[in-house]
Amino acid sequence: MGKKFVYLFKEGKGSMRELLGGKGANLAEMTNLGMPVPQGFTITTEACTQYYADGEKINNEIKAEIMTYIGELEKIAGKKFGDLENPLLVSVRSGSRASMPGMMDTILNLGLNDAVVESFAKKTNNPRFAYDSYRRFIQMYSDVVMEVGKAYFEKLIDEMKEQKGVTLDTELDADDLKELARQFKEEYKSKIGADFPSDPVEQLMGAIKAVFRSWDNPRAVYYRRMNDIPSSWGTAVNVQSMVFGNMGDTSGTGVAFSRNPSTGEPKLYGEFLMNAQGEDVVAGIRTPQTIDQLKEQNPAVYDEFYKIVYTLEKHYKDMQDMEFTIEEGKLYMLQTRNGKRTAAAALKIACDLVNEGMITEKEAVLMIDPKQLDALLHPQFDTAALKAATPIGAALPASPGAACGQVVFTAEAATEWTVQKGAKVILVRLETSPEDIEGMHYAQGILTVRGGMTSHAAVVARGMGTCCVSGCGEIVIDEDAKVFSLGGKEFHEGDYISLDGSTGKIYGEAIPTVPASISGDFNTIMTWADKYRTLKVRTNADTPKDSAQAIKFGAEGIGLCRTEHMFFDSERIAAMREMIVSKTEEQRRVALAKLLPMQRGDFEGIYEAMQGYPVTIRFLDPPLHEFLPTDEDDIAALAKEMKMDVADLKAVISSLHEFNPMMGHRGCRLAVSYPEIAEMQTTAVIEAAINVQKKHPEWKMVPEIMIPLIGEIKELQYVKNIVVETADAIIAKSGIDLKYMVGTMIEIPRAALTADEIAKEAEFFSFGTNDLTQMTFGFSRDDAGSFLGAYYDKKIYENDPFAKLDQNGVGKLVKMAVELGKVTRPDIKLGICGEHGGDPSSVEFCHNVGLNYVSCSPFRVPIARLAAAQAAINSKDQSR
């Protein structure tokens, strides 16, 4: 016996979600609960997978099984498919195992043709209803199955209404709708070059194929990528007996939620339309009535519906989103699913369900999508204003939140406009560099033409909690002329734009924002999450301000303090540049002496902000050319300061330029070339810790010094010797018993492969997965965004490996390094500090491979805390 590809609703179960999809499993469950569900059958997700394996064709075996089940449905309904006397009409709907509202396609009223519709009109004694259903079917089938598009048909409807002098579709009579059906078929033939199909079996197979095909439409692909839904899952197809909400004033259709999806208020919430079909409710052509008004119009139906709603909520232990139809006074349930909700509503609903005794704390923690928490931590657009706005473009949603401001094109302008004019600005750049840090700090939002989800702009913006949209290749920018164009419009310095860093949408106008608000439910959920997680959560922070913000969000230390970010301040960059262009060690030491108190002061501020929590400080990492000036005036000023000829300085700058700087003279290689840099940084780290320890004897300061970019144990030995010799001398002189650790960042594949050797010297590993991903794939994370789109289209990749950890390749290196490191040093401390530390699926991976902590930007700390709790709960549940 071959594989079974089709199941009647009554044959299925709620536990068969992977096979039947969410909608099919829930229809089966509602059927088993004895609810009024129009009967039908589900074509499985495996049939969808087979459709693609067979070259986007429905094979004969699956076709035969579908026709067998059409026969079974005819028996249940007491009607015949394509019959003139008693025709069976069906709806064909998608249903993936993960809810994807609005992403895939639906066809209603299937089975009608010219002969059947006339018979249908006589049998129902309602010709208006029959021809309304027919014109809807022709329009929907043409749009969804044949991809003609809706616009042509909408134009014909508008012309008919204008000719008849009416404003609503419901005011057209049977003759009008019959004429529209004729015009629709003509429009179909003119576009397709063939007559509209009259054979119901041909219609059915075309509709099923269209739903399978819609699994790969652009909006569905994008939604899957945003929500970590694998393309291999496929979608099921549900073929269901039609019930009609458009039979007159005693019929209707609607959508309702068991709780308010915006606020979480425990009250029935929804809308319905009488004499309508499903698409009318969401199309906005007619104003729907609230669900409370159904109670007044038909108390019996309302009471039955109310009872079903709360039976379903108790059964699924979650807020339900339901579709229903009333056919001549009789209620039918078309679907139920766990409802989509705002972040604030999600927290309230989870807490309320615990308080009502419906679910446990653990179930409440598992109920929240960690990514949703972003919406609570960042400003958002005013909802009403956003509805009225139209985006002019879209790119990568690199850092969440909403931003509105005046366009500026340089970091200097961002600073000047904010400080001197009190303006709110959006910094628009081809790409950002470390030199832009001050302007990025002042900007409300950042928009770049180049760069991916882990580009400089994205990483820094997330760290600061600033909205960022990156990689908008459609922008044509002239930074010198201070103008860019997008969506057919030009924007000059001072013009207003708005960015949505959560969706990547760009608006060419000012849209007001509202501040983030965190409710008491947030703290309740976080408390429960902390109770069950085992993975610690640290932050990536480079300033006392960012550190303090992270502590507010529940960080338990710093996993990455990037010391280079401290040198880009306008008061410090000169000393840094002086150090870089020095020709002798003596000159370098003079410049480093100027930097030492600055760095020591920063570390003291960070230690104070972290209140005794562990702090991992990474030594200087980027290539030196990033600190050097490119502007002629800046070069001349530095030459004067250094008493150098401008030409000589330009020669030095040119000599430091590298063809591939991310793989060049940076990280530990700088300390190998210039040991005095590591000496100065060690001095700053240890002296700051001693000063803070004296001030706060109750804190047990244990600074963690991280040597970056190690690929060979001898590199680590060399730099570690400098650190130990310097640190021990300072500690001995201070009279304070200060402990410290020396470890490394694992970001080069060779370091992961030789982790057992490196662990002889390293007391901790911190996985720098940004660079580890870059070097494992051979991609530049700043340039990958320009070609990854083609990889998504061709299904080579489903996700950006810089945003979601590649567990098969990069993850294998991490797992190997963890195991090798523990063999040499069983108590080695293990963490991750790449941007993946704030991605929920990557956090789960970190939990499963045995890391001690993850580290992420301050505004992603709550996301990581919740994801870590979910990983712990799920792993314990699976181990039982």
Image (tube, rainbow, N blue to C red):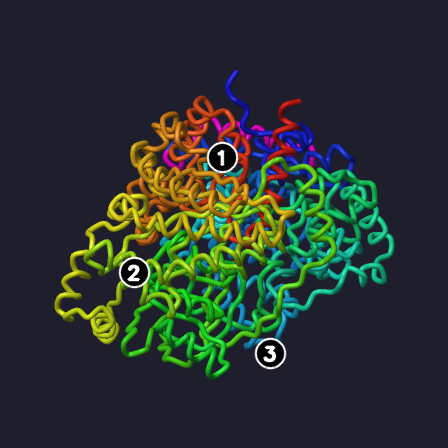
The answer to whether residue 400 is above or below residue 476 is above
> Quick one: label 3 or label 1, which is nearer the N terminus?
3
Q: Is residue 90 at least partly visible in the picture?
A: no
Q: Quadrant of residue 481?
A: bottom left
What residue is drawn where x is 46% and y is 25%? Answer: 825
Residue 42 at x, y percent in the picture? 59, 35
Q: Amino acid at mark 2?
A: Val
> Quick one: label 1 or label 2, which is nearer the N terminus?
2
What residue span does the magenta drawing correspond to?
55-77
Q: Which residue is mark 2?
A: 590
The answer to whether marks 2 and 3 mark residues whose Cβ atoms lie closer than 8 Å is: no
Q: What is the spatial separation of the Cα atoms under label 3 and label 1, in whole angstroms?
A: 73 Å
Residue nearest the viewer, comparing 495 with 567: 567
Foreground mark, 1 or 2, reads: 2
Q: What is the spatial separation of the Cα atoms under label 1 and label 2, in whole angstroms?
A: 37 Å
Residue 812 lies left or right of residue 172; in this view the side is left
Q: Secondary structure at mark 3?
A: loop
Q: Which residue is mark 3?
A: 165
Residue furthest top in the image: 1
Tell whether position 365 is magenta.
no
Residue nearest the viewer, comparing 702 with 351: 702
- The label number, if any, that marks residue 830 in the structure image: 1
Q: Amino acid at mark 1?
A: Leu
What residue is drawn where x is 44% and y is 72%? Answer: 426
What residue is drawn where x is 83% and y is 45%? Answer: 356
Foreground mark, 2 or 3, reads: 2
The answer to whether residue 855 is above or below residue 41 is below
Residue 577 lies left or right of residue 507; in this view the side is left
